[in-house]
Image (tube, helix red, strand yellow):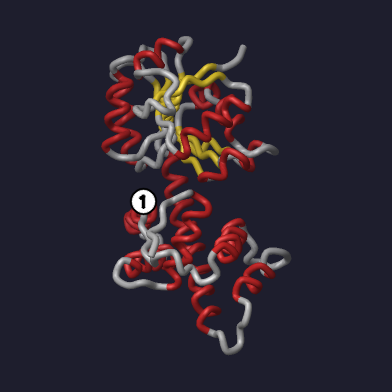
Amino acid sequence: MVMHIGLVGLGKMGNNMRDRLRAGGLEVTGYDPNPAVTDVPSLADMVNALPAPRVVWVMVPSGAITDGVLTDLAGVLEKGDLVIDGGNSRYTDDAIHSTQLAEKGIRFADCGVSGGVWGLKNGYALMAGGDEADIALAMPIFDALRPKGPRAEGFVHAGSVGAGHYAKMVHNGIEYAQMQALAEGYELLDASSEIIHDVTGVFEAWQRGTVVRSWLLELLVKALKEDPEFKDIEGYVDDSGEGRWTIIEALNHAVPVPTISASIFARFVSRQKDSPAMKAVAALRNQFGGHAVRKV
């Protein structure tokens, strides 16, 4: 039988995920307050369209919006249904949401998702947290969303509820540090114009054979070719929370994370002056995640 799921939130990520799931053979009924993208006019209509036990994937911004959606779903779902939070929620919120839904007999799992706007084409890296039975029920979803190839290279059942978002939190902390290192290298090369005449070419040459080759490096080369001096980008870099949460967890466990910590503080510097390194970070976030950049 073809699996039929509900998907709440059809923004940049959710809309692409709906397309990839459908391409993977799943039936998807999506709901979004935006009438231009939604499949049904209400959450209740979405739930009524799904076979029991229902599986609903939530892909909305973390915090109050996720809280509101889960509260609304608790009012329309039934005992035995499963909700998966695929957004960037803080892992400590997962226990709260799980308990809230369990009061109605509704099951809950969480999933950290990485892949940004490229996920539709390349697939998403998925980090799931929840009971074994719930993850097994949702496996057709994970298999449709992850990159092609061995399952272990694009999906992990990281642990119990909260483990998926915890793993994604650490992933994003590492990502912050990697982007910062590339950006600082860019600024140093750019400042050495008396000896370095082709900054973009240097980064491009690093894409094969070097130990620093990576997808982020490839995206930096792409960004440099589009705007070699980042003249159209303001050196302001936002943060979505995961890096801060990573540092807090490191403090709680007495684990030193000086590189990740430095990358977060560097973003704060970007909000005080127009930094070439921060322009590079802003450009990278736009390349891999479609995050907005501030234009000069």
- Tell me the amino acid under the disc marked 1: Ser
Kindly identify the residue that appears in the image at 34 percent across and 56 percent down: 244
Looking at the picture, how far across and down is residue 59, in whole percent?
42, 33
Q: Quadrant of residue 95?
A: top left
Residue 117 left/right relative to 237: right
231 and 237: which is toward the camera: 231
- Determine whether 241 is above or below 127 in the image: below
Quadrant for the C terminus, please.
bottom left
User: Quick one: SS at disc 1?
Assistant: loop
Look at the image and tell me whether residue 204 can be seen.
Answer: yes
Please state if 111 lies on the left or on the right of 224 as rendered. left
Query: On the image, which quarter does residue 3 sit in?
Result: top right
Q: Is residue 256 visible?
A: no
Between 237 and 226, the one lying in front of the other is 226
Residue receiving disc 1 = 240
Mark 1 Cα-neighbour bin, 10 Å: few <14, some 14–19, many ≥20: few
The spot of residue 5 in percent (x, y) is: 49, 20
| Residue at 48% from the left image edge and 60% from the top image edge | 283
Residue 80: image quadrant is: top left
Residue at 62% over, 82% down = 197
